[in-house]
Structures are given as structure tokens and as C-alpha cells.
Image: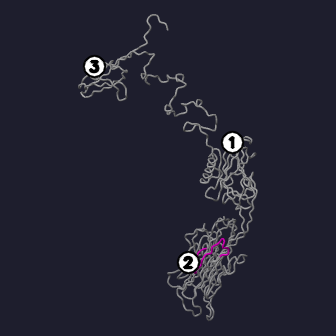
Amino acid sequence: MAYIGKQPSTKFSAAAKVDTFTGDGSTVAFDLANTVPAGGENGLQIYVNNVRQKPGASNAYTLGNDGSGDLKRITFTEAPEASAEIYVITTYEATNIKNVPDGTITNEKIVDGAIDNAAVSPSAAIADTKLATISTSGKVATSAISQPGSPGVYLDGTGSWSAIDTSQQDTNAFNIGLLGFKMAVNEGLTVFNLVDGVVDEFNDESGTDEAEGSNDLYCGTSDYYINSTISSGVSSPALSAGFSMTTITEPDTSVAGTNPAQKSATLGTFTVPSGVLSLNLKVWGAGGAASRYGGSGGGGGFSTGCLSVTPGQSFKVLAGEGSISSGATPGFPYAPQVGELTVGGFGGGGNVQGCGGDSAGGGGGLSGIFNPTAVIAADDGSPQTTAPQIYLIAGSGGGGGYGSLHPGSPGGGNLGGDGGTGGGLTGDAGTTGPRAALEQTSANCGSGGGGDQEQGGQGGPSSPKSGQPGGFLYGGTYTEGAPGGNGNVAGGGSGYYGGGSGGDASYRGGGGGSSYIGNPGITCGSTEEGALAVGGGTTDPDYVAGTNEGQAGPVLSSTGEDGYVLLSASAICASATSTTIVSTAFSSTSVPTSARIVVFEENVDTPTLNTDIIASISRDGGTTFTNATLSDSGYVTGSSGQRILTGQATISGQPSGQSMRWKLALANNAVKIHGVSLQWA
């Protein structure tokens, strides 16, 4: 630019800076507030008590760097005395503004935002360390980042472009489906919805469309679909498993009980074989013993019913032990055997304690089918057992009452009362002399009453000793402790509720126990009582001779017959069916183009995937289906049971829609389907 006159100066000097200090007699170094220009030692004016000091190491002071490396520390050769006034003036050389010296512009001298994009060189090499603090997407324009040009790569954590790992994509999708299935199981849900999928863990048929499916047999007890004519899918031969107290007829399914001594026994066990889903149950009760010189023992009852079962389910079985009378010396006149015991059957059959060889009869023991957790005691009930643990019971007969019909006695004598017959929902009361039997819980004169569904039979009244009432799973027995009396107490028969024992006098029989068919699982249940010493169910085609009946009296040595238990099933022939299972419709949030299915399947036969089990998926509500190729992904747990079948399908070619359905077509070989998970994207 041309100027008229003298060109303006291009050099400017900054205003001088002033620092003041006060000596303390020991400090020699003092730091200025501002950096002194390089070589500016001679430009300093330093005064101590108004006396100017000469620079130089051999003079008053030197200028050097402070602890931060800045040129602004004055070091005196001798410490100024205490209270000395130190006055420092820093002058600056004129600076040409076109040539700014290095290191003279600090951050504080730059106005925020003054440096824009145009001021930064396009070839500026910005170190990575200068980018370390960028933490939000707003600081970087994504359009400015160099793109690799392929959607199959991404920017990894090292700042490099890497290929997306898709090797675990199927596994992750499967795991999501499996997780959803397990959550549905644990939370007791039938249909568990995911954001882009659904899990149907079968607890009922609410997640499937029965109108669209065909031959889709559902097993409600184990919650699965099966393509078979029967819900187990397994054929089985006819079954007939009989139990006495110590023997069995079907060793493949049964274990016999033991009976080493009277009133001592263990129960048998029965396990449902493969393919059997329903059992026919029959139970005959035990008979009561007769009196040595009097009435007959009552016959046992008969109960029957049907029960739905599952293979592997087990039961405890007790056939019912008949009672026995004592073995005292027979004849008249007889030799008294004080304290002689007539022993009832195991499981609550009433005992008798007589004053001699003229004892009355004991009651028959418990006979029935029980849950494997049931505990049956020898006498006086089973407090550890409750009604839900009982499937079926047949009541047992009561003991015969003592009479005076002694063999060989001159002029004959009187016949004792008969024991009440077991069976029926209410057992018979014992008789007293020639009186007729009655279904009642109250005592029949001095004879014990029969048990029913809520209480045991009443004990026969007598003086000085009355009979003991029956109770839950036991019959009444003799009463100890009262003085006097002859001790000829007829025992009550056991049952669901046992009969009462007769009173302590002649001619009084024990009551019969009641049967039980009230378990909720029992269908077609019925019960039959006998008639006096004849047991119930003796005309049934499966009746076994020599069981179930009471001993007719009088007889010198008496034994009531044991009961019997039979569990049977008809032969089953299973065959695979062609079955279609279709889900209800589920709504997706957008139009999906692909889908993945997880099927929880259990083999009955040996199927071929994608032939015997074909999975397909629809996005248009079931009008169009696309097959998914299934593969075996192993078992849910262990090495058996439910398998995990997985498959995927591209459904973009179907008519556009957001109504999702899955379909399974089963054929040739029977399989069980426990649940299905469907995901889409």
C-alpha cells in the first residue's frame, strides 16, 4: 500500500510489567508473574530498597527458569534482608506483528470458536491422542467417516473395518427361543410372547387352532400332541397283575409283599408298564374269624373302579390278612387259657383277648391299593396316611361273637352273634344271637356297628367293659383295664373306617369295615358287600377261590380268609396317524421376511426329519406356508427325552402380511410335540 508521508510503524511494545516482593533475610529466589522475553535479563530493572541491582552471576542476581520451565525466576546472590522492598520492572522489546515469535501466543489469547474449518489445513496431521476425548456421536459427522462400501462390515473397537461375524446367528436365535420356552415353563404360561416371536409351551390347547388341525390328539395329563391312535403312542399286551399277601401273578410289573407272622407284613408294589394308560382295579376284603363256640366271622367286601395312569407310575398293594382265633385246648369242660389272644389281620383288624378257650373271633385286616407314600400300621390305624393317598379299599369282615354252643356239652347251647360283613359304603353291624345284619354305624344291641365314610362303627355297649369303636383304617379291638368281665370281645373288621368291636359278653359280634371308592381319579367305582360269612364279589369272573370269606362258626380253630387285589388292563395296539397341528395367528409389528422355528419333540418311534416331521411358516394368516428345513440341535437336558429341532425359512416371497402361524405335519412314525417357538424378522 502506498502512503503519503511516513509509513506507520509495524512494531509495537507491550506495556512494562511490575512485580513487588518483600525480603525475609533467607529467600534468594523470587518468581515473576510473567515470562521474561528470551535474552531480556538486561531489560529488567530490579530495585532493593530503591537501589537498582546489577545483573550477572558475579553481581546482584541472575535470571532463570522456574519450576514449570518458564523464564521468570530471579535468583539473588545474597538474600535480601528482612523487610527489604524488592521492586521489579519488566520491559518488552517492540515486536513486528507480521512475525510473531514462537511460543508467544497462548491459549488464553485465542478467542473461543475463532478457528473455523477453513483455518485448518486439509493436510493437517491430527494425532490420535487429540481425538481420545471424543465421546458423543454429535461431535463427529458420520457422513465424514470413510465408508467401506459393504453392509457386511462394521467399525470395530480398534478403529478398523471388520467383517460381521454371523457364525453364531443361528445359535443366538435358537437360544432366544429356548430361553423363552424355559421362561414359559417356569412361569406356568401357555403362550409366552416375545417382541418378534412367540413361545407356546403346551399346558393346554389354547395356542393351536383345532379347526385347522387334523388328528391332533392332545394328552392333557402330560401336555403334548401326538400323531397316534392312543395318547402314549405305545402298544402293550393285556395285563393281569394279581396280589395275595405273599404272591403275585405278574413278576414283570409286580413285587410281592411279605407276611412272616400274623399281624406282621410288608406291602407289595406295582409299576405301570409302558403303553398302559388305564387300569381296572379290583379289591376283595379279608374275612373275620369265627368264635370257638359261637358265631361266624363276617365276609369281606368287594370294590372296583377304573384309574387313568402313566407308564412308570407305582402303587402299594395290600391284599388283606384274614384274622385267626386262638389255639386253646378244645373240649368241654375246657381248660381256661386266661389272656389268650385272637389276632386280627394286619392293618387294623380288631384283636380279641379272652378269659379262656371260649374266645370270640378277630376282625379281618386292611385290603386296598395306595399311593407309594402311604404308610400302613399293623394296629390301630395309620396316622401317617391320609385319604388322598388311598385309591381303593374293600372293607373286611368283623369277628364272630362268643356263644355257649360247646362241642360235647350236655344239652347243647346258644349260638354266638355273627361278625358284620365288610364292604359297601357302610359296613354291617355285628349280630347278637339270631338278629339280622344291618348297615349301620351304631351298635346292634351289644354287637359293634359298621364303619362308614366318615366314622368308625360304635363299640357294643356292655358292663363292665364296652367294645371299642373302629376308626380310620382300623377296627375296634378288646378293651383293657376294666375289672371283671369275661373278655370275650369280638374284633371289628378294618376298612376305610373300621367296624366297632362287640361288647364284653356272649353272643355279640364285631362290626364290618367300610369300602372306599372316593378317590377323584377313580371312575366307574362300585362296591359290593357280602352276606354273613360269604364275601362280596364272589361271583365276579376274576374272583379267586379261597379268598375273601369269613370263617363259619362254631369251629375250634378259626381263620378268616385273606383278601385279594387285581390290577388289569386290556391289550392296546397303537398306530401312527397323519396329523396336522396349526397354531393360532400371532401379529407381528412389521412385515417379516424371514422366520425361525424351534420344536420341542420327543421320539416314540424313530422319525425322519423333514419327512415324518415337516415344519412350515406363514405370514398371511395361514393361506400360504413355506417349509423350514429342520435339523437336530440335541436334547433339552441329558441324552434322552425332548429333542430340540430348529429350522428357518425365507418368507419374503409370500403375500405381504403380519399374521404369523406355524404348522407341523406329522406322519409315518409317532412323535410327541411338547412345544413350539416361532421368531420372525
The residue carrying mark 1 is 592
Q: Bounds of the magenta span?
A: 248-267
Q: Secondary structure at mark 1?
A: loop
- C-alpha separation, residue under disc 2 versus residue under disc 3: 133 Å
Count of numbered badges drawn on the protein: 3
Give the mark nearer the N terminus: 2 vs 1: 2
Amino acid beneath label 3:
Lys
Judged left or right of residue 111, residue 578 is: right
Camera-side residue of 411 and 292 = 292
Q: Secondary structure at mark 3?
A: loop
Instruction: Identify the image quadrant of residue 611.
Output: bottom right
Amino acid beneath label 1:
Pro
Q: Quadrant of the C terminus?
A: top right
The residue carrying mark 3 is 54
Camera-side residue of 131 and 214 = 131
Camera-side residue of 269 and 335 = 269
Which of label 1 and label 3 is nearer to you? 3
Give the mark nearer the N terminus: 2 vs 3: 3
Above or below 527: residue 599: above
Which of label 2 and label 3 is nearer to you? 3
Q: Are marks 2 and 1 in contact (CB under 8 Å)?
A: no
Residue 161: in magenta span: no
Residue 259: in magenta span: yes
Residue at the far top: name it: 5
Q: Position of residue 77 (x, y in %)?
A: 26, 25
Residue 500 tag number? none
Q: Callout 3 environment at 10 Å: few (<14), some (14 to 19), or many (20+)?
A: some
The residue carrying mark 2 is 468
Coloring basis for residues: one colour
Give the mark nearer the N terminus: 1 vs 3: 3
